[in-house]
Image (spheres, rainbow, N blue to C red):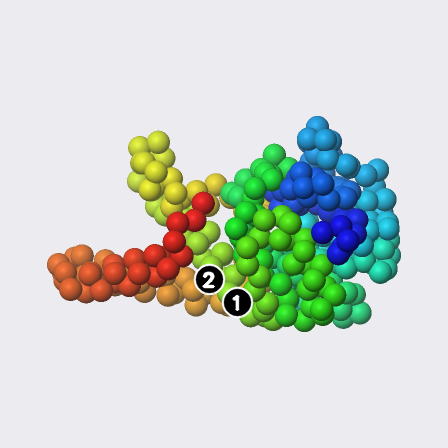
C-alpha cells in the first residue's frame, strides 16, 4: 500500500472518512487527517488518529488525498487539495459523482475522481465510524480514472477491506444510486412514517421491522443534498415502488393467490442473488 500510494490524507472525519482513517491506521498506513468539525477532530484524537493542525497541513506532501465531506463541500476541499498537493491523486467519496452536481469547474474536475464505497450507517459523525465498515463492500469508481488513479484507488480501498470495484461513468453511477441507495432510504422513511401515523411504537416490532426501518433514523441534513439532484430519476423510482405496492394490495384484496405468488417469488429470487449481507 505505502509503496503504491504513499502518504494518505483523509479530509472529513464523519462515518466514511473516520472509518477509512481508522482502518488505514490499524493497518499501519501512513495517514494524516483533518475535519472542519471540532467534535470529530477531538474524537479522532481520542482514538489516537493523527489529526493535523489544519487541512493544508494534512494534505501537504500527500500522495493520495481522500475527500470525505458532505456533497456541497467537495468542490471547496478539492480546490484546497490541488493547491496543497498539486501532484497528489485526489479522490472523493460522495454519493453522487456528476460534475454538474458537485459544481466543480472543468479544470479542477479533471483531477478529482469519485470513489463511492457502498457502505455506511444511519448515524453520522466520527462516533458512527468503525474500522470494519468497508469489509467486503463494493466501491464505484469513475470510469474516467486513468491507470495511475485506478491503481491508487484500488490499493487504498482494498486495504480498507473492499472486495469489488465497479467502473462506471458518473452519470450512470448517479442514476443507479437513485434506485439502490436513495429509494431504499425513502421506502424506509415512508414505512416508518406510516407506522408512526397509526400510533404503533417501534418497540412493538421485532428484528424484521427494525431492519426494514433502520434507514429511517438517517438525518435529512445528510440526505437533502443527495435527493434534490436526483429528483427526476427518483420520481420514476418512487412510481415503480408505488406500482408494485398497488399490485400487492390488489392481489391481497382480491385473494389472487397466483398473482401474489408471482410478485412474492420474483422479489424473493432477486434478494437471494445478493446472499446474506451485514
Circle 2: is it few (<14), some (14-19), or many (20+) Cα within 10 Å?
A: some
- Residue lying farthest to the front in this orientation: 3
What residue do we see at 82% from left, 51% from top?
Answer: 62
Q: Is 27 situated left or right of 193 in this image?
A: right
Q: Disc 2 and disc 1: Cα gap in Å? A: 7 Å
Circle 1: is it few (<14), some (14-19), or many (20+) Cα within 10 Å?
A: some
What residue do we see at 76% from left, 43% from top?
Answer: 31
What residue do we see at 81% from left, 39% from top?
Answer: 52
Q: Is residue 91 above or below residue 17?
A: below
The mark tally for this picture is 2
Mark 1, residue position: 175
Q: Is residue 94 above or below residue 38?
A: below
On-image quarter of the C terminus: top left
Q: Is 27 situated left or right of 182 in this image?
A: right
Q: Tag on residue 179?
A: 2
Q: Is residue 226 visible?
A: no
Q: Are marks 2 and 1 in contact (CB under 8 Å)?
A: yes
User: Quick one: SS at disc 1?
Assistant: helix
Location of residue 172 in the rendering, given as x and y in whole percent from the top left corner: 55, 70
Location of residue 212 in the rendering, given as x and y in whole percent from the top left corner: 38, 46
Q: Quadrant of residue 253?
A: bottom left
Q: Nearer the viewer, residue 217 or 26?
A: 26
Q: Quadrant of residue 91?
A: bottom right
Amino acid at each position: 500500500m505505502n509503496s503504491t500510494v504513499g502518504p494518505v490524507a483523509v479530509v472529513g472525519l464523519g462515518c466514511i472518512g473516520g472509518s477509512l482513517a481508522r482502518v488505514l491506521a490499524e493497518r499501519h498506513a501512513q495517514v494524516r487527517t483533518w475535519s472542519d468539525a471540532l467534535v470529530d477532530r477531538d474524537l479522532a484524537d481520542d482514538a489516537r488518529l493523527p489529526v493535523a493542525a489544519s487541512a493544508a497541513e494534512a494534505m501537504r506532501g500527500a500522495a493520495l488525498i481522500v475527500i470525505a465531506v458532505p456533497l456541497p463541500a467537495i468542490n471547496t476541499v478539492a480546490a484546497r487539495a490541488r493547491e496543497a498537493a498539486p501532484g497528489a491523486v485526489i479522490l472523493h467519496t460522495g454519493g453522487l459523482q456528476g460534475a454538474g452536481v458537485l459544481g466543480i469547474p472543468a479544470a479542477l474536475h479533471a483531477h478529482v475522481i469519485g470513489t463511492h464505497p457502498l457502505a455506511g450507517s444511519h448515524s453520522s459523525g466520527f462516533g458512527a465510524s468503525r474500522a470494519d465498515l468497508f469489509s467486503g463492500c463494493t466501491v464505484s469508481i469513475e470510469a474516467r480514472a486513468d491507470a495511475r488513479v485506478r491503481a491508487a484507488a484500488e490499493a487504498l480501498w482494498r486495504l480498507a477491506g473492499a472486495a469489488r470495484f465497479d467502473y462506471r461513468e458518473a452519470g450512470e453511477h448517479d442514476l443507479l444510486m437513485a434506485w439502490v441507495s436513495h429509494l431504499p432510504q425513502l421506502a424506509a422513511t415512508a414505512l416508518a412514517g406510516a407506522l408512526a401515523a397509526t400510533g404503533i411504537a417501534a418497540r412493538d416490532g421485532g428484528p424484521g421491522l427494525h431492519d426494514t426501518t433502520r434507514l429511517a433514523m438517517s438525518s435529512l441534513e445528510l440526505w437533502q443534498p443527495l435527493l434534490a439532484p436526483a429528483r427526476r430519476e427518483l420520481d420514476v423510482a418512487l412510481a415503480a415502488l408505488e406500482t408494485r405496492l398497488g399490485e400487492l394490495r390488489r392481489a391481497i384484496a382480491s385473494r389472487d393467490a397466483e398473482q401474489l405468488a408471482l410478485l412474492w417469488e420474483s422479489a424473493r429470487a432477486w434478494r437471494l442473488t445478493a446472499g446474506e449481507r451485514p
